[in-house]
Image (cartoon, helix red, strand yellow):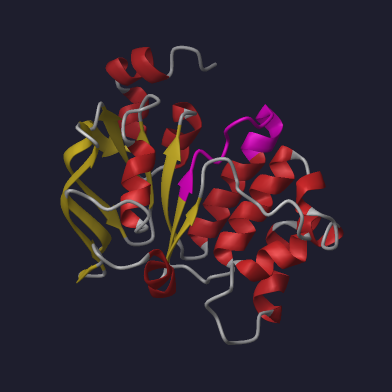
């Protein structure tokens, strides 16, 4: 199995503070890889570095063997990597359909087939096609954010805290969708504070603490690890 993403010596500083301290990660093609850790550990910074939103102090980030450090965010999206940002970031004063079309802004081909695919994944979005995105529930906005990202036809979808602030039943739906997307051939790089759910779906997992990778293994291995249980799963039933 080849690695679709290889992150080597990723170092990111904000002012004089080193947020990410030379981490190495691999993302095998076709897998779900999760990065868990506390708030401020460097998870979001890692995703933003891959997507070109943050410029690393130093790093090599290879996508299918090609260096992407220094490329612009739109170039990275056009290559096949897309980000579902934390907080969903839908356009509240645009309709569901308009939000989805924005996800395809770099494409010149026909969107109808992909819109139909999104509506099959998320029937609720079809029902609310002409509704303003700002009037949707939190779960529906998260579905819209994922759908918008899928409209760019990515090979890798990165998700930053997709379950944040959602009711438990909605969280289960979101994770089912993550698994469905993955089974259809899209590689997933997932950041989650809900470590229990993330490790259950992950093929590979990393733990990041204060900008450093402290542990890695399969999702099942980390789920069974006593240190992980105490640090991240203690409040999870």
Seen from the viewer's position, the closer of residues 36 and 137 is 137
- Residue 79: in sight, yes or no? yes
The stretch drawn in magenta includes residue 94: no
* Residue located 27% across and 53% down the image: 55
* Residue located 43% across and 18% down the image: 233
* Residue at the extreme front of the image, as rendered: 15
Q: Is residue 221 left or right of residue 44?
A: left
* Residue located 60% across and 48% down the image: 89
Quadrant showing the C terminus: top right
Q: Is residue 16 above or below residue 125?
A: above
The stretch drawn in magenta includes residue 170: yes
Q: Is residue 13 above or below residue 168?
A: below
Q: Which residues are magenta?
A: 159-172
- Give the percent coordinates (x, y) of residue 57: 17, 48
Count of numbered badges drawn on the protein: 0
Q: Is residue 136 above or below residue 53?
A: above
- Give the percent coordinates (x, y) of residue 189: 40, 50
- Residue 118: in sight, yes or no? no
- Give the percent coordinates (x, y) of residue 135: 82, 45
* Residue located 35% across and 67% down the image: 72
Q: Is residue 120 left or right of residue 9?
A: right
- Give the percent coordinates (x, y) of residue 43: 35, 37
Quadrant showing the N terminus: bottom left
């Amino acid at each position: 199995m080849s690695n679709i993403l290889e992150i080597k010596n990723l170092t990111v500083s904000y002012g004089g503070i080193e947020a990410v301290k030379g981490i190495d990660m691999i993302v095998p093609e076709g897998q779900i890889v999760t990065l868990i850790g506390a708030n401020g550990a460097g998870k979001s910074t890692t995703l933003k570095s891959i997507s070109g939103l943050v410029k690393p102090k130093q790093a090599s980030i290879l996508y299918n063997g090609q260096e992407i450090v220094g490329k612009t965010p739109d170039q990275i999206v056009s290559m096949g990597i897309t980000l579902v940002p934390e907080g969903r970031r839908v356009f509240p004063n645009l309709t569901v359909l308009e939000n989805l079309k924005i996800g395809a802004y770099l494409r010149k081909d026909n969107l109808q087939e992909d819109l139909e695919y999104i509506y099959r994944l998320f029937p609720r979005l079809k029902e609310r096609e002409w509704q303003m995105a700002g009037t949707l529930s939190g779960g529906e906005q998260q579905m819209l954010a994922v759908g918008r990202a899928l409209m760019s036809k990515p090979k890798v979808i990165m998700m930053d805290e997709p379950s944040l602030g959602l009711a438990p039943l909605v969280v289960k739906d979101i994770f089912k969708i993550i698994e469905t997307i993955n089974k259809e051939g899209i590689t997933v790089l997932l950041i989650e504070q809900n470590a229990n759910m993330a490790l259950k779906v992950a093929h590979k997992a990393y733990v990041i603490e204060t900008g450093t990778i402290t542990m890695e293994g399969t999702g099942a291995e980390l789920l069974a690890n006593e240190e992980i249980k105490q640090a991240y799963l203690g409040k999870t039933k």
